[in-house]
Image (cartoon, rainbow, N blue to C red):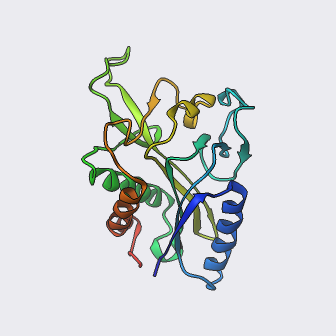
Amino acid sequence: MVEWRISEGLVPYPEAVEFMESRADAIAAGRAGECVWLLEHPPLYTAGTSARSADLIEPDRFPVYQTRRGGEYTYHGPGQRVVYAMLDLNRRGRDVRAFVRALEEWVILTLAEFQVQGERRAGRVGVWVVRPERPPGPDGEPAEDKIAAIGVRLRRWVSFHGIAINVEPDLSHFGGIVPCGIRGHGVTSLVDLGLPVTMNDVDLALRRSFEPAMRLCGAAHG
């Protein structure tokens, strides 16, 4: 069974990393079960293994944490639902690409519960929404904003880190970085899209969407 944890208040980033690493080791050793942790962080930036210094525009704006998850710079802060997924890919299929696709599907199914169409984009990590009310870009492509980020790490085929869905964060806080190293696109949130969604609403949708999404990476558990 998957343990679901929900933290009230803002969880310091180092505390979250310490818990994830400890739990991932325990899962790999067979001492603990899988865990999904839903939380919020105080405002901060994290740098993934592919982060480029030029993409940190305002290095003194918020604390910056180096992290060994995949990806580039990401913002976390109040109003963003961070989902740390400590899952055993030894049981779910040792296919990293399929697992990342399952995480994307988890976000897409969750957003669909609020009638938001989240989409994948080749060459762009995360989940995106089209903004038809804005003019298209210079290449004629529709305007799009990022609504969720994805970044994972595996240790002994156990995952940690995970996804972050923008529910109602201060979107101006993304201005201190180039989110995920992708220029020319904005960021949005459920509330920015005009939806009066609460964090509890999102949590319930995440739980309902978890099993269907995880079928993309192998046998479902919990």
The one nearer the camera, 42 or 15, is 42
Q: In this view, does 2 lie above or below 123?
A: below
Is 91 located above or below residue 57 in the figure? Answer: below
Location of the N terminus by quadrant is bottom left
The residue that appears at 66% across and 44% down in the rendered structure is 46
Residue 98 found in image quarter: bottom left
Q: Which of 99 and 145 is in front in this view?
A: 145
On the question of residue 87 being in view, the answer is no
Residue that lies at the very extreme toward the top in this rendered image: 138
Quadrant for the C terminus, please. Answer: bottom left
- Give me the residue at 58% from left, 70% from top: 158
Residue at 68% in and 54% down: 13
> Does residue 165 appear anywhere in the picture?
yes
- Residue 182 image offset from top left, x and y in percent: 53, 31
* Residue lying farthest to the left in this orientation: 115
Among the 4 quarters of the image, the one containing residue 103 = bottom left
Q: Position of residue 85 (x, y in %)?
A: 52, 64
